Image (tube, coloured by chain):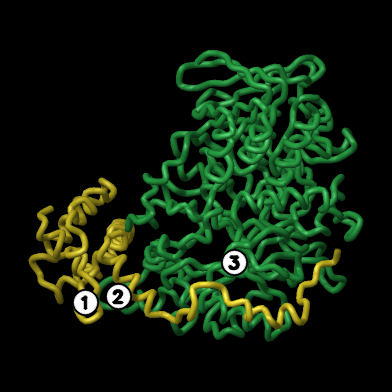
Amino acid sequence: MSLSSAQALADLLLPGDGATGWPSASAALPQLGEVFSSLPAGYGAAIAELAMEVAKAGPEAGVALVESFERAAPKPFAALRDGLYEAYYATPAVQARVAELANGAPREPDMGFDPTLLTQVTARQAGLRRL
Amino acid sequence: MADDFADVVVIGSGPTGGAAAWRLASQGVDVLILEKGDWFDYQGLDRDGPDWESRRARALHSNPNIRRGPWDDPIDDAESPIKPMIGNTVGGGSIYWSAHVPRFRPEDFRVKSLDGVGEDWPIAYEDLQPYYDLNESRLGVAFMPGDPSGPPQGGRPLALPTIGAHGRRMAAQFDRRGWHWWPVDLVVGRDGDAPRNGHCTHIGPCDLGCPSRIRSGADRAYVTEAVAAGARIRTRTRVLELEHDADGTVTAALCADDTGRFRVRGKRFLVAANGLGTPRLLLLSRSETFPNGLGNSSGLVGRNLMLHPYARVDGVFDEPLGAWVSGEKAGIVSFEFYASRPEHGFKRGLKLQLTGGPGPLATARGAIFGAPLPWGAGHHQAFAERFDHVCGFTVCAEDLAEPDNRITLSDTLKDRDGLPAAKMIYKVSPNSRAILDFGMARAREILEGAGAKAIVDTPLRSEAGFHLMGTARMGADPGTSVVDPFGRCHDSPNLYLVDASVFVTAAAINPTATAQALALRTADHIVGLG
């Protein structure tokens, strides 16, 4: 499988999004070829053929090709998808984007525990031990 | 390897073996620790590495059957729905732990008297109280004093980190119902009040031995200091059998390492190989005098295996929860339903513990939601709509001892030395199942009250056999127990068991602190014997 074919297929599955900062699979994974080569041996030929067809077809027709492959060969497709997801979410660029997302969530004003939160528990003696 | 000798031979360098070795060595006792694994390579853990989530599912998994590390031997778990989660390295299970060290409650030692089930311990909470204090001071524990559900704690608590925005949200729901909740007792290491959050790289939840060394494992808290106090440690050393005289006195540990077999002799032997490894070693140490295994005249070695069966209930929310905001966080627990109540259809009770949702990779793979994220143009939006939109509660049930739940020797699997592997046979009892079901309903109440739009139940977690207890229980009567109140085997005058295998009941509380307190107490007892 050529690198350009692998990139075309990977980017179809995990495209970049400039507006939100997500890198494409090929941008995040400089060693993309290793992802494909680590897939189960029996699936290699079918996935290589799919990649080649996607590269030739372009993005819109490529989506239809992948959808068709997913229906016709669910196990090889699942291996491809899972392997790609695993590699993608283990890259520094994607981890950085995840951290940005995480840090946009609500946060406590202080990094230490706020003991006033326990006022009601203490006042009620909730869960009071038996002995 | 040449034969060796020590006054006290400690087998296992996990949380309890490490504690006992340190306590003995620091009082001048000649101690040799035998450890089947090696020192844990914190640098090799590379927590900052972006592939942490993948490695935790494999090489850093806490189930040795999945991890298959260089020191791991197979465990036959085909007859247990809950799989063993143990460490085989210096520090043992504390390399893979959540670093929660709550104390058992005083009532936990009187279960039979209070609730008519299980057995009473031959010791009381007060016997262990000074050792809980000592253990907490050695570990460095952050906690909030004043928890109504527990006994007063001594010592200086280290500073607790925030419970996070999601913790605050759930705490409000407990308050609304008048239910108990409290932040966890969290090991932060004795230097835990040193600059804290700068250490945190926000790579995953705080439940794996932390290479930034804030979360102190037993390797750091005890074993290193035991060695500094004069103890010796032989790593990569497997104990195959305890050789003994006709009266049960242990004469030597038959060992193996990469160079071959050798013997380690000693005056006293302490076994701290956890609730699975300890009974296995006793069962392997058969002789004409003890055909059913050393210390097993009661027939109870390996029997009465108690776990903490876990269920989990997750809530899915419309908005981000803040569970993955950078920085250390403490969990919260509830002991509202810890004690038996007449209106419950079960005996004993449970702990609820708040947990965050799945990590990035697990989210992409479909954790909680059941299906992987879509590929293509909608992938990133779908990720943003799921990640940090989930939090949940684990329900930890107090298991009662059942003789048929046990550790025995496998007929099919062998370790690298050709010895039978440990076999785990376990069924969730109707009482434990009822506790889990009740706890799940309470967790759903909290999550729905907090605004969860969907609830996902996991009635029983399989990868949850962290707490292996009761397989060589303590008691005053040699006919109904394996060890005496100081952990000494009834059948073997110089053999002591110092781990959770001696537990009489399981509580619904993480067992490490109690097991360590027992180990420290046994060590002092031995020092007192001279």
Counting the numbered discs, the total is 3
How far apart in space, not on screen, are marks 3 and 2 (Cα)?
27 Å
Marks 3 and 2 share the same chain: yes
Secondary-structure class at tag 3? strand
Badge 3: chain ID: B
Q: Amino acid at mark 2?
A: His
Say which residue label 2 marks.
B380
Whether residue B404 is visible here, answered yes or no, is no
How far apart in space, not on screen, are marks 3 and 1 (Cα)?
35 Å
Say which residue label 3 marks.
B312
Contact flag, marks 2 and 1 (Cβ < 8 Å): yes
Look at the image and give the colour of chain B: green
Q: Residue at x 32, y 79 (%)?
A: B381
Q: Where is residue A16 shown, x and y percent of the image?
A: 20, 73
Q: Amino acid at mark 3?
A: Arg
Q: Where is residue B324 shown, x and y percent of the image?
A: 44, 71
